[in-house]
Image (cartoon, helix red, strand yellow):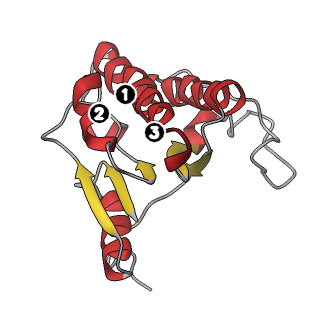
């Protein structure tokens, strides 16, 4: 099975790719050499893939980014991935997309007295990264419902690499 990993040069992408390779999968990477805002780059990268892990994004720690760069990478990029994924038809087994808990308003002045679930807080964000991830989640939902693209969204809260947290 061939799997595309966008953001393969990042912490999560490199880890995911290594795990797939170690388990015998054929992994194709899409990193800094490609442009998510360029449909041709994205379409070529998904050809022949049965799985897509869309982890590539402009994010706070990778910047600084302008609002236009956030839009091009995080909205036009996810749109291009979804369009290309739709073109794969039934050969696409699944698309996984990395979102963030920055999509939720989790620090209200009065606090939160119950455990947070993926549907317990409104999707609102004032910063570009979180806001565009909210829009991206809505794009994914549209493609799942209208185009039947098999997709799952993961909202990462904290990502730590091996050796970054001392016990």
Q: In the image, residue 91 lies at what x, y percent?
A: 50, 49
Q: Residue at x 12, y 40 (%)?
A: 33
Image vertical order of residue 148 relative to residue 164, above or below: above
Q: Earlier in the sequence, mark 3 or mark 2?
A: 2
Label 2, on which residue? Answer: 42
Image vertical order of residue 93 relative to residue 147, above or below: below
Quadrant for residue 83, please give it: top left
| Cβ atoms at labels 2 and 1 below 8 Å apart | yes
**Mark 1: secondary structure:** helix
Q: Camera-side residue: 3 or 159?
A: 3
Q: Residue at x 29, y 33 (%)?
A: 42
Label 3, on which residue? Answer: 88
Image vertical order of residue 132 relative to residue 9, above or below: above
Q: Would residue 95 be found to the left or right of residue 39 on screen?
A: right
Residue lying at the far bottom in this picture: please name it.
167
Q: Would residue 75 be found to the left or right of residue 63 on screen?
A: right
Within 10 Å of disc 1 (Cα), the crowding (few <14, some 14-19, many 20+) is many
Residue lying at the far left in this picture: please name it.
33
Within 10 Å of disc 2 (Cα), the crowding (few <14, some 14-19, many 20+) is many
Question: How far apart are labels 2 and 1 at the CA level?
Answer: 8 Å
Can residue 164 be seen here?
A: no
Q: In the image, residue 51 lies at what x, y percent?
A: 45, 54
Question: How far apart are labels 3 and 1 at the CA level?
Answer: 17 Å
Q: Earlier in the sequence, mark 3 or mark 1?
A: 1
Label 1, on which residue? Answer: 77
**Mark 3: secondary structure:** helix
Q: Residue at x 81, y 45 (%)?
A: 112
Residue lying at the far right in this picture: please name it.
114
Quadrant for residue 137, please give it: top right
């Amino acid at each position: 099975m061939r799997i595309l990993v966008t953001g393969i040069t990042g912490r999560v992408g490199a880890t995911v790719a290594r795990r797939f390779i170690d388990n015998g999968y054929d992994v194709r990477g899409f990193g800094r050499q490609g442009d998510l805002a360029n449909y041709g780059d994205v379409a070529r990268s998904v050809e022949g893939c049965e799985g897509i892990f869309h982890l590539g994004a402009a994010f706070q720690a990778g910047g600084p980014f302008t609002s236009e760069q956030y839009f091009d990478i995080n909205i036009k990029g996810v749109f291009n991935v979804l369009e290309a994924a739709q073109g794969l038809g039934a050969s696409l087994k699944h698309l996984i997309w990395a979102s963030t808990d920055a999509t939720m308003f989790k620090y209200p002045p009065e606090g939160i007295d119950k455990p947070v679930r993926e549907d317990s807080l409104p999707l609102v964000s004032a910063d570009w990264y979180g806001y565009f991830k909210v829009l991206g989640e809505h794009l994914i939902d549209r493609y799942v419902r209208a185009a039947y693209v098999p997709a799952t969204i993961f909202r990462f809260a904290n990502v730590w690499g091996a050796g970054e947290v001392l016990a």
